Image (cartoon, grey):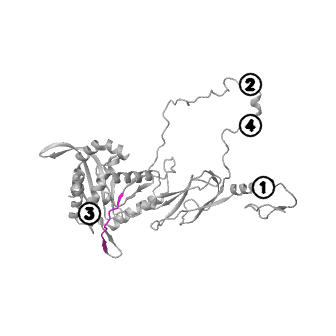
Amino acid sequence: WVCCTKSATVQKAQCTTGKSDPRSSVFQIQYFRTTAAYNEVVTVRTPAFAESVTERDVRWEKAVGDTVSEDEVVCEIETDKTSVQVPSPVAGVIEELLVPDGGKVESGTALFTLRKGAGAPKAAGAPKAEAPAAAASPPTSATLPPPPSSVGPIPTAMPPVPPVPLSLDRRAVSCENCFVKMNRMRLRIAQRLKEAQNTCAMLTTFNEVDMSNITEMRKTYKDAFLKKHNIKLGFMSAFVKAAAHALADQPAVNAVIDDTTKEIVYRDYVDISVAVATPKGLVVPVIRSVDGMNFTDIEKAINLLGEKARKNELAVEDMDGGTFTISNGGVFGSMFGTPIINPPQSAILGMHGIFDRPVAVGGKVEIRPMMYVALTYDHRLIDGREAVLFLRKIKSVVEDPRVLLLDM
């Protein structure tokens, strides 16, 4: 008796009697195993979500019958904080979408099924059958293909750049009256901002910062800083570090009101959220334990989070928490504005553009690079005195970073 091993696609073991070439049995076993792996159907489920994420909608990038490669994005799960991409674990063809577009999902929900390895694209350069009529006449100079060249045709004009509507879903349409459904993140942003207006007694105080010293410091050391740390030295690190210094000086700004227990919660740590604009909306990834970081650490953290935001790779954990927020509208040319608190925090610092303005210095009028800054705070918790002193501390540190070294 010579028996064949049962494979995944064979329901009953097939046996033959008598003498048989063992190589044929091995060949048969190998054949069935390859077929089973090729036709295997994989079910892909949603990843685990943080407990703070309450709303999750699916938006499909692929359809039934589409061929996908390994790690190619099949859908995105839009939450109230970010979008989570769901890639294909293997190459294959999508057999079924188990959740409708826009449908809500939970952790572990089955999203789609994928037939592994099926429908793989044909190899490039495969010969194609010529039409019978093509052989009837000899090729002429007009029908001959151009000679091979390592250089492509030289363009004569710049390619058109399609407009990207930042405030809309990226599946935008070109029409006069466009109706685009708000994505989950945009809906949550609108809800949170309105909640902040309804809950907090928001008040804003202003000051201006002379950026002469910090600009000169950056100009002097930016090349050496880039060479040593492989990252650019910007102004944001100075404001983040100044905010951490000011939060230690005015702990009420770093605190929050627990509306359930009617208590004030004072934090003994400083986690600063940095607002980043993305095509889908404003996200606020968090830099943890800023009070123990230097300028280099902060610049690296900002660069990493900014890169993840641009690539839509921010995880929910990157945005959980935060005791204070900094928003830099100056990168878009903003001159003045009043930011809105990012709940459940109690205050937010707004940075604006740097513009040359005439200012009085030592009894004389000089042209200096100046920036307006604004602190919006919850007046239920933070008094005007604390808010003004906080903003003055920001001003003193940015105008003279030596204040940090002297802990003043």
Closest to the camera, between mark 3 and mark 2, is 3
Q: Residues within 10 Å of mark 1 (few under 14, many from 20)?
A: some
Distance, label 1 to label 2, CA atoms, is 49 Å
Q: Is disc 1 in contact with disc 3, using a CB cutoff of under 8 Å?
A: no
Of labels 1 and 3, earlier in sequence is 1
Kind of element beneath mark 4 = loop
Indicate the quadrant where residue 389 lies.
bottom left
Q: Amino acid at mark 1?
A: Gln
Instruction: From the viewer's side, name the closer residue of 400 and 354.
Output: 400
Q: Residue furthest left?
A: 363
Q: Which residue is mark 3?
A: 248
261 over 388 or under it: above or below: below
Q: Amino acid at mark 3?
A: Ala
Q: Is residue 320 left or right of residue 6?
A: left
Distance, label 1 to label 3, CA atoms, is 74 Å
366 over 250 or under it: above or below: above
Q: Which residue is mark 2?
A: 138
Q: Amino acid at mark 4?
A: Ala
Q: Residues within 10 Å of mark 4 (few under 14, many from 20)?
A: few
| Identity of the residue drawn at 76% across and 62% down | 6
Q: Which residue is mark 4?
A: 129
Instruction: From the viewer's side, name the closer residue of 199 and 66.
Output: 66
Of labels 1 and 2, earlier in sequence is 1
Q: Which residues are magenta?
A: 263-273
Indicate the quadrant where residue 10 lies.
bottom right
Of labels 1 and 4, earlier in sequence is 1
Of labels 4 and 3, earlier in sequence is 4
Q: Is disc 2 in contact with disc 4, using a CB cutoff of under 8 Å?
A: no
Q: Amino acid at mark 2?
A: Pro
